[in-house]
Image: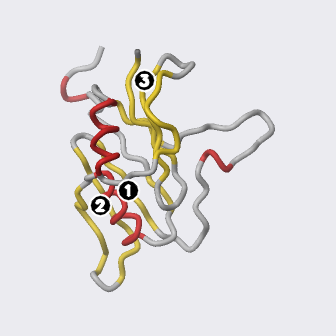
Amino acid sequence: MTTNTSRISNIAPLFVVLDVPSALAFYRDKLAFDITFQGPEPTDIFFGIDERDGAMIMMKAIGVQPAPNCTRDIGRGNAPWDAYMHVPDPDSLAAEFASRGVQFKEPIHDNSDNLRGFTVADTDGYVLYFGRPL
């Protein structure tokens, strides 16, 4: 049992990206995230943070190619997502994203893991799952 002071309220993945301003713009323009940090200087942006509701994604350009989970084949299957975002109403969010011209990697559906949701790949290939348990 945890107390209110020892609770973990959320988690934020750190994605290695090729170009931070382009990555931030995708999340802002397509997924309606707010850019809450980009820097460290306006002329030298190599780190950024996008947030929407309780979700936060950090991104950093470090001079290497991004390596999304779905690109890693270790001979024992792969991990299809880089981040799971719990969404109480994934159908409504999918409709919002469709109205913004988002291309879905997988459309809204019930999957074999007893989840209802959809996936979107960002500009660097990271796959985000938006959904909830059935």
Which residue: 35% across, 64% down?
24
Q: Quadrant of the N terminus?
A: top left
Amino acid identity at mark 2: Asp
Percent of width and height locating residue 102? 39, 51
Q: Secondary structure at mark 2?
A: helix
Q: Which residue is mark 1?
A: 58
Percent of width and height locating residue 86? 35, 30
> Which of the 4 image quadrants contains residue 46?
bottom left
Q: Earlier in the sequence, mark 1 or mark 2?
A: 2
Q: Secondary structure at mark 1?
A: strand
> Which of the 4 image quadrants contains residue 25?
bottom left
Dot 2 alpha-carbon crowd within 10 angstroms: few under 14, some 14 to 19, many 20 or more: few
In this view, the residue farthest toward the left is: 4
Q: Which residue is mark 3?
A: 116
Residue 8 position (above or below residue 16):
above
Residue 106 position (above or below residue 124):
above
Q: Which residue is mark 2?
A: 29
**Distance of label 3 from label 2 (alpha carbons):** 24 Å
Which residue: 41% across, 64% down?
23
In this view, the residue farthest toward the right is: 75
On the rendered structure, is 77 left or right of 28? right
Q: Nearer the viewer, mark 1 or mark 2?
A: 2
Q: Are marks 3 and 2 in contact (CB under 8 Å)?
A: no
**Distance of label 3 from label 1 (alpha carbons):** 25 Å
Q: 63 and 86: which one is in front?
A: 86
